[in-house]
Amino acid sequence: MKAIVYPTSHLLGEINALSSKNYTTRYLLIGALAEGTSTIYYPAHSEDSDAMRRCVRDLGAIIEEDDEKIVITGFGKHPKHVSELNVGNAGAVLRFLMSIAAFCPDLTFVNTYPESLGKRPHDDLIDTLQQMGVEVEHNNGRLPITIKGGKPRGGKLTVSGNVSSQFLSSLLFMTPLLEEDTEIEVLHDLKSKIIVGQTLEVMQQAGIVVHASDDLMHYRIPGGQSYQAKEYVIQGDYPGSAAILAAAAVTNSDVRVLRLEENSKQGEKACVDVLRAMGVNLTHDNGVVHVRGNQQLVAGEFDGDHFTDAVLAMVAAAVFAKGTSRFYNVENLRYKECDRITDYLNELRKAGADVEERQAEIIVHGKPEGVTGGVEINAHFDHRVIMALTVVGLRSEKGLTIRDAHHVAKSYPQYFDHLRSIGAKVELVEE
Ligand SMILES: O=C(O)C1=C[C@@H](OP(=O)(O)O)[C@@H](O)[C@H](O)C1
Ligand SMILES: C=C(OP(=O)(O)O)C(=O)O
């Protein structure tokens, strides 16, 4: 499917934020790791959350669902011994389940997205699983990956946090189920550190004890624990909503996004502060972000690691800001669905933006007058590239055509419908 985005000067209306992808994958996982029956209200419905649902079902969880909830009966520490799992293009789902696969004798994660997830590295987690006595066959740290587990050992472990926090989260979810205690030391740096807070939050809700150091670099996890079955409610999703808020910020708008909790642990809630720092007229009260955009943005400097999944949307807003913006500490964007620095900036340049890259930085020389557009954009299999380029297209002179825009469904299948409901001119055409 391609999305033809036409210049749109005004946006007006109200959107109910989609449900959080990262909480949905977490609650499905801990529901599966519990022995009783848990209920998850308002789960996300997207390719990634569907991937987690499909995989935990394959591993033996029993799932029933209706329009508002998923009821899941878990398999505890005894997943079914399946030989193959397909996680689609979902990085977090793959990484979280690689540790759970250590309880299975011979499980292969297949490679269905060779151009996207198939290129992403998992060496750091493979290394730790090997420290636990688990045999792992892999393609140079990439898919397909076969895990020959059985009886993984705890004890003293190290994991690198340089590339992704998902490796650490994966080990945190699994190690309480081991017989012995585990100590984890995070080596190097810990990227996307904030999201580890979401991992610890949901584990605590399920009654799991983890002793974490204040800097989140050291952990002691008592063994022999069980996840309790509970009821969970999924909050609105900041990473997806960041693109809607960016669209409102670069147009003349009066847009309200509901269900965005002020006290959320999602790092991407910082997008509200980023837009405010860029001079956008907005308020955030009672879970509602209200943007009154007037196309007057100013540049700023931001540590993008605090809001990793919202960086692309914030860069799209900065394309129209007065002055030069800098998003630093973002090297790990290179290891996501595509290289979100080189690939994304290439597409922005085609659209007419003036951007520069460093190894760990995105620099944007803003163009308050707008960009020319009138070109075709390659989505690079990346939902966040699609969402961000849509924002740029709305403020372009000639619009943009985004090829393979159906990949937006990885996290936000209703994105274009939501944008159109507030007045964005977007046409969807089967390719
Ligand atoms: O733990 C998670 O659910 C996620 C962690 C982040 O990845 P990194 O830790 O690789 O930055 C984020 O980008 C991803 O969308 C989801
Ligand atoms: C990077 C993302 O997801 P994942 O790593 O789970 O594929 C994302 O949602 O932007």
Image: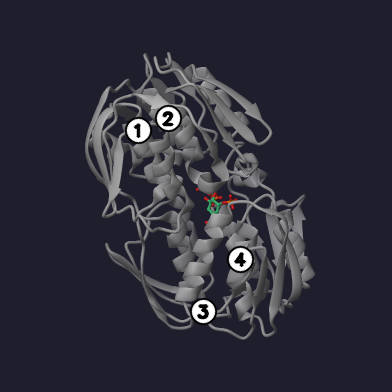
Tag in front: 3 or 2 = 2
Residue at 23 percent across and 37 percent down: it is 421
Q: Secondary structure at mark 4?
A: loop
Q: Amino acid at mark 4?
A: Asp
Residue occupied by mark 2: 317
Q: Quadrant of the C terminus?
A: top left
Q: Amino acid at mark 3?
A: Phe
Camera-side residue of 59 and 388 = 388
Tag in front: 4 or 3 = 4
Q: Position of residue 60 (x, y in %)?
A: 51, 74
Q: Secondary structure at mark 1?
A: loop
Can residue 393 be seen by looking at this rendering?
yes
Q: Position of residue 264 (x, y in %)?
A: 40, 58
Tell which circle, 4 or 1, labels the residue nearer the N-terminal end: 4
Q: CA distance from mark 3 to mark 2?
A: 45 Å
Residue occupied by mark 1: 280
Residue at 46 percent across and 28 percent down: it is 318
| Residue contact at pointers 2 and 1, CB within 8 angstroms | yes
Tell which circle, 4 or 2, labels the residue nearer the N-terminal end: 4
Q: CA distance from mark 4 to mark 1?
A: 34 Å
Q: CA distance from mark 1 to mark 3?
A: 48 Å
Residue at 47 percent across and 61 percent down: it is 25
| Corner quadrant of residue 11 | top left
Residue occupied by mark 4: 214
